[in-house]
Image: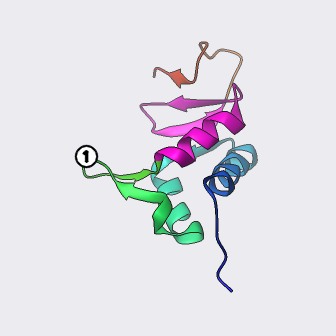
Amino acid sequence: MKITHTPEDVAKWMLEQIKNDGFLFQETAVYAISSKFGEDFTYINNNGNPAIRKDVLASFRKSSGDDIVWQRGEKQWRQRQSYDSPGRNQID
């Protein structure tokens, strides 16, 4: 019997990783998602970089709310800190 995963399953896993470790690097996430859930949840973007499928990211944004921020320079998601600016994207 083949196990079928959903974008929500992947998003839940991403959120668990951040809650456990405090952060999740994009590159680490892409390779772990591909290995754990299947290559269908990742792709190579226009810049030639591995990326996470957009429906997974949309589910992740919805499930993580304001608790998680994207640290652009580090290319990582992390838990929101008291000093963070409003919004998801944080400038280094």
Could you tell me residue 70's position as x and y percent?
A: 54, 31
Q: Residue 83 location in percent, x, y?
A: 65, 14
- The answer to whether residue 4 is magenta is no
- The correct choice, above or below, for 50 with respect to 88 in the image is below
Q: How many marks?
A: 1
- Identity, as a three-letter code, of the amino acid under mark 1: Asn
Image point 47% across, 44% down: which residue? 54
For the rendered model, the colour scheme is rainbow
- Which residue reaches farthest bottom? 1
The part of the chain drawn in magenta is 54-79
Residue at figure coordinates x 47%, y 64% from the top left: 40
Question: Which residue does the numbered mark 1 point to in the structure image?
Answer: 46
- The residue at 71%/51% (across/down) is 12
Q: Is residue 55 above or below residue 88?
A: below
Point out the residue furthest to the left here. Answer: 47
Q: Which quadrant would the N terminus be assigned to in this image?
A: bottom right
Residue drawn at x 59%, y 17% as measured from the top left: 87
- Looking at the rendering, which quadrant does residue 47 occupy? top left
Q: Position of residue 64 (x, y in %)?
A: 70, 35
**Mark 1 burial class by Cα count in 10 Å: few <14, some 14-19, many 20+:** few
- Give whichever of 30, 3 is nearer the camera: 3
Q: Is residue 57 magenta?
A: yes
Q: Quadrant of the C terminus?
A: top left
The image shows residue 55 at horizontal and vertical percentages of 53, 46
Q: Is residue 18 left or right of residue 70?
A: right
Asked if 6 appears above or below 18 in the picture, the reply is below
Judging from the image, what secondary structure is the residue with disc 1 in? loop
Q: Is residue 44 left or right of residue 20?
A: left
